[in-house]
Image: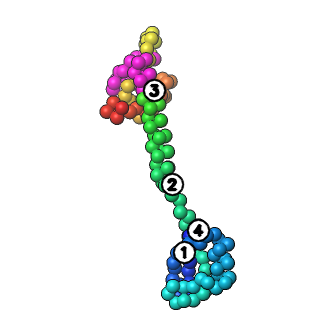
Amino acid sequence: MIKYCLKCNDCSLEFESWFSSSKEFDRLKKLKYLNCQNCNSIKIEKSLMSPNLKNTKKKLIDQNGQKFKEVKNKLRNYQKFVKENFEFVGDNFAYEARSIHYNKKNEKKGIYGKASPQEVKELNNEGIETALIPWIKDKEN
């Protein structure tokens, strides 16, 4: 079955109708069995009609939701690794990074913490390697 949006060329009425196939529409039109419900004209044409896509938005939302969960889980695992293998220095990240870099401390453990974009830029300009990591707050875990 196929549904067409039809238009009367005489009175411009638009209406929908079901057909068993596109060939069936052509056959009925050729036999002059199609007529306008309003003015009874047989000058009926197919007009543009959007396809009926069932649940495509829902599937897309479900797929995006699943991808979001996968990414969030990977970030959680990465965050867990960082917490277990690096020392948290909080807002003192820039200071601690400079201390390690310039004092050549033999730190066995790397550090992580918070730094402003300006501090990160300054550290990079000084040759101190930094990396930005997307961080999920514990409340969201």
Q: How would you rate the neighbour count of disc 1 (Cα within 10 Å): few for under 14, some for 14-19, many for 20 or more?
A: few
Mark on residue 17? 1
Q: Mark 4, mark 3: which one is toward the viewer?
A: 4
Q: How many marks?
A: 4
Q: Give the residue type that dot 2 points to.
A: Thr
Image: 55 above or below 68:
below
Q: In the rendered structure, which amino acid carries the disc numbered 1?
A: Ser
- Badge 4 crowding class, 10 Å Cα cut-off, few under 14, some 14 to 19, many 20 or more, is few
**In the displayed structure, would residue 30 be above or below residue 119?**
below
Q: Which mark is residue 2?
A: 4
Residue 86 falls inside the magenta stretch: yes
Residue 21 visible, this orientation:
yes
Q: N-terminal of the two: label 3 or label 2?
A: 2
Mark-to-mark CA distance, 1 and 3: 56 Å
> Which of pointers 2 and 1 indicates the residue nearer the eye?
1
Q: Is residue 31 left or right of residue 1?
A: right
Which region is colored magenta? 77-101
Whole-angstrom CA distance, mark 4 to mark 3, is 51 Å
Task: Name the image quarter holding residue 117.
Answer: top left
50 relative to 59, above or below: below
Q: CA distance from mark 1 to mark 4?
A: 8 Å
In the picture, residue 18 is in which quadrant? bottom right
User: Can residue 9 be seen in this snapshot?
Assistant: no
Going by the numbered disc 3, the residue's amino acid type is Tyr
The residue nearer to you, when weighing 28 against 68, is: 28
